Image: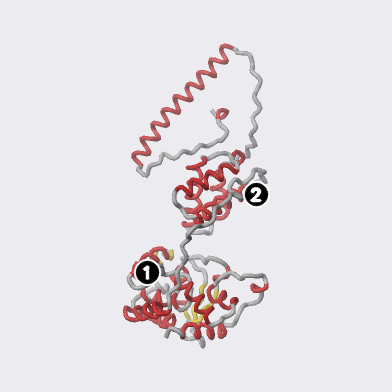
């Protein structure tokens, strides 16, 4: 049957989450395929018996390269997934499944830019935001690109250069107003538990939730001349960028929260509730904290809003941009900014003290 198909593997979604329904559906498809293939075999036998005159072969314009989307996915995970988390693998598999559902699993040489446009339209039709569609495209594009480059293939990546519409009414993170920030921090002192320590730590450092959830007790230096927290990768979580690895002075509510968390910690992790089974679960933390914030914070303010607030608080005191970037772990804006070891912790401490003193 190989001569009847251009791809060595064809994947079709049965569009069900039920294992029982999938088994029934696959059996029906299997029976129909066997009947179809039997008919083809009979035709081939008949042709050989009748000894029909040999017909000239039709030229087929097909620039196959021997790899389909599933091959590209497997190659990508093999080369890039060995030291990544299970989330990395799930995202790659999920995004390739999205593409196959819309444009099928074909040889990479068969796809055209029209397929990329069809994939975009299908994703937008699911009411996904443009930013979400761009993330999916970026993932699939990288997966295909790696196979094309690794094997020296001349096929065009159909997911490169696809036009994306402008984001309309994109949701913007709302920073905490000063009075709301003070209110939240006072509530955290009143509750005085691990969830509120996590909120307070983020509120006066501007660190990401994922960074805070994966902290170890050893990452906190309370006895140093300037108390600080070291943001560094560990076995429970990676960091978003190379700029994310940094040291942040502990001031204001962040110093109180870190002291409480260290004092009450029962494991090597600062927040063991969210570092189970060798993995930092920031999604679970986000759901719990945002649920609490909804009853106490203005509409639109979520746990990530503290990060936006910190940038605004540093802007308000005219803190230099590269100091702001170093505190927040944002990537440097120019090559020159990335030179050297950055500002000493005493400088960062001076600006954080000034920024947080406004809300005390």
> Is residue 296 shown above or below 2?
below
User: Which percent across, then down, holds residue 43?
Assistant: 52, 18
Q: Residue at x 43, y 65 (%)?
A: 280
The extreme bottom residue here reads: 225
Q: Quadrant of the C terminus?
A: bottom left
Q: Residue at x 49, y 42 (%)?
A: 102
Disc nearest the viewer among 2 and 1 = 1
Q: Secondary structure at mark 2?
A: helix
> Is residue 345 shown above or below 23?
below
Residue named by callout 2:
149
Q: Earlier in the sequence, mark 2 or mark 1?
A: 2
Q: Residue at x 63, y 13 (%)?
A: 53
Which label sits on residue 36? Answer: none
> Is residue 319 shown above or below 131?
below
Residue named by callout 1:
289
**Residue 195 seen from this side:** yes
- What distance separates the C-alpha of mark 2 from that of mark 1? 43 Å
């Amino acid at each position: 049957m190989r001569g009847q198909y251009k791809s060595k593997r064809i994947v079709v979604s049965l569009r069900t989450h039920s294992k029982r329904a999938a088994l029934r559906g696959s059996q029906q498809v299997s029976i129909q395929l066997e009947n179809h293939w039997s008919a083809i075999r009979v035709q081939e036998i008949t042709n050989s018996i009748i000894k029909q005159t040999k017909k000239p072969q039709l030229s087929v314009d097909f620039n196959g390269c021997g790899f389909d989307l599933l091959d590209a996915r497997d190659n990508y995970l093999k080369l890039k997934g060995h030291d990544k988390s299970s989330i990395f693998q799930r995202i790659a598999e999920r995004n390739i499944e999205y593409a196959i559902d819309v444009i099928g699993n074909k040889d990479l040489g068969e796809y055209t830019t029209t397929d990329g446009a069809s994939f975009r339209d299908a994703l937008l039709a699911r009411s996904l935001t443009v930013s979400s569609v761009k993330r999916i495209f970026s993932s699939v594009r990288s997966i295909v690109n790696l196979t094309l480059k690794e094997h020296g293939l001349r096929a065009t990546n159909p997911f490169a250069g696809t036009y994306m519409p402008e984001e309309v009414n994109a949701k913007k993170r709302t920073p905490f107003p000063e009075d709301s920030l003070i209110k939240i921090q006072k509530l955290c002192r009143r509750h005085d538990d691990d969830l509120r320590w996590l909120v307070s730590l983020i509120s006066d450092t501007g660190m990401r939730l994922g960074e805070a959830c994966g902290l170890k007790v050893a990452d906190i230096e309370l006895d140093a001349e300037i108390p600080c927290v070291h943001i560094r990768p560990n076995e429970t979580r990676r960091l978003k960028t190379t700029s994310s690895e940094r040291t942040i002075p502990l001031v204001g509510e962040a110093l109180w929260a870190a002291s409480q968390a260290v004092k009450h910690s029962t494991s090597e992790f600062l927040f063991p509730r969210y570092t189970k089974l060798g993995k930092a679960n920031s999604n679970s933390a986000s759901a719990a904290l945002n649920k609490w914030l909804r009853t106490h914070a203005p509409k639109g303010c979520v746990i990530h809003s503290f990060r936006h607030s910190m940038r605004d608080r540093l802007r308000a005191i005219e803190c230099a941009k590269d100091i702001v970037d170093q505190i927040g772990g944002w990537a440097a804006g120019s090559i020159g900014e990335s030179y050297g070891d950055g500002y000493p912790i005493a400088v960062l401490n001076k600006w954080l003290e000034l920024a947080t003193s406004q809300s005390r």
